[in-house]
Every structure is written in structure tokens, then in C-alpha cells.
Amino acid sequence: MSTHTSDSRVRQLQESRNHNSPWFEVIPAVSSDERLAALEIRRRVFSEEQGVADLRVADSDDARSLIALATAQRAGAGNNERWPVSTGRLTLPLARGGQALVAWVATIPEARGQGAGGLVMRFLLAAADNAGAREVALAAQLPAEDFYRRLGFSPVGPLYDVRGIPHRRMVRLRPD
């Protein structure tokens, strides 16, 4: 799925209206500034906060994936300035009806527990459903497993370790 045309950006912004709140807005990260903001959230959460050494926060799938970026309005009367607070990535299957993959879901600490991560995930899941993916898989960090369960994911298989952090594969089937 390419999100680099203005027509697709307008369409995704229209579709995302259901994935926003009075505080947060979720958009596809298309511009270089938006993509850099998503990478900065990844770096801050996975590298700084979780201490994953030598982490590359970008990979080859970024170019062909939908990267969602949630922003929040800064406090202050009449202030329209927004700041990036959460991100996630959806990589669609090469063939319609295949398995999509969600990765790099992260929310900065000061925005956690306010709904930004859930909005990012619902944005990505809607895109997967609209693209015809039969299921969506992800590698959940163990502390986030309940978060993903609430979004319809089920654990599949045993726990495994990724750079010292326990993970479990989870899958969500496309709703009928």
C-alpha cells in the first residue's frame, strides 16, 4: 500500500476520522517530517526507555508500509500546535487475503493510558481490513498482551525472547 499520493492521503484522512478523538489525531505518516517523528518515537521508546542496544529504528519494510502517527494538541488556549505521541506500522501482504503485520507500536510515556495507542491500532486494523487482509499478526511484548487482546488479538504459541524482552506472537482474524 502506498500512502505517498495526495489522493490516497486525503482518502486515508477521511477514513481516519473514526480513529481520532478530541485530543488525538491519527494520520498516515507521509511527509519526511511525519516519518522522522515516527522514528523518533520508536527511538525514544525502544532504545532509550527499554534500553535495547544497537537498535535500528528503521528497516526495509518502512518504505512499503503504512506508518500511523498520532498527534496531540498542546495545552493552552487557542493553541493549534500538535506534537507526536504514538506510532505504529502496518505492512500489508503482497497478495490480497494474506496476512498483514503490525510492528513498531509505541507511545511516549507522558501520553500512555490516554487512548493514543488504541487509536493508532484501530487506524492500522481498519486499513488492513479495507485492504482485504484475512488476518493481522504482531509480536507483542508481554506487558502489552492485554492491550492487544482488547483489540481482538489472540496469543499464538509460546513466549520468546527478543533482545531480553519477552514477546508472544498474536493474531487477529478479519471480522466477518
Image (cartoon, helix red, strand yellow):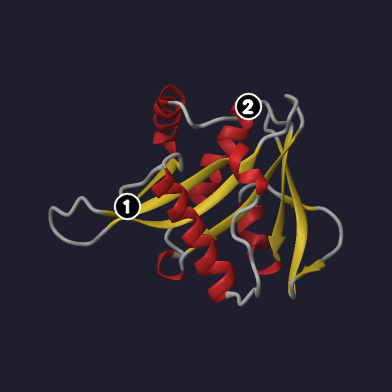
- 67 on left or right of 157: left
Query: 3 or 115, which is in the foreground?
Result: 3
- 130 on left or right of 4: right
Tell me which label, 1 or 2, sits earlier in the chain. 1
Secondary structure found at label 1: loop
The quarter of the rendered structure image containing the N terminus is top right
Q: Looking at numbered disc 2 in the image, what kind of residue is underneath it?
A: Ala
Q: Is residue 87 above or below residue 48?
A: above
Q: Position of residue 80 (x, y in %)?
A: 20, 50
Distance from Cα at disc 1 to Cα at disc 2: 28 Å
Task: Choose mark 1 or mark 2, whichever is in front.
Answer: 2
- Which quarter of the picture shows residue 97? top right
Residue in the image at 48% along x and 31% along y: 4
- Which quarter of the picture shows residue 122? top right
Q: Which residue carries the number 1 mark? A: 23
Residue in the image at 68% along x and 61% along y: 145
- Which quarter of the picture shows residue 159? bottom right
Query: 4 or 89, which is in the foreground?
Result: 4
Q: Mark 2, residues whose alpha carbon is within 10 Å: few (<14), some, or many (≥20)?
A: some
Q: Position of residue 138 (x, y in %)?
A: 71, 51
Q: Position of residue 79 (x, y in %)?
A: 17, 54
**Disc assigned to residue 15:** none
Q: Is residue 28 above or below residue 142?
A: above
- 84 on left or right of 169: left
Q: Which residue carries the number 2 mark? A: 131
Q: Is residue 116 visible?
A: no
Q: Count numbered badges in the picture.
A: 2
Q: Assess whether mark 2 and mark 1 are in contact (beta carbons under 8 angstroms).
A: no
- 20 on left or right of 96: left
Q: Looking at numbered disc 1 in the image, what kind of residue is underneath it?
A: Trp
Q: Mark 1, residues whose alpha carbon is within 10 Å: few (<14), some, or many (≥20)?
A: some
The quarter of the rendered structure image containing the C terminus is top right
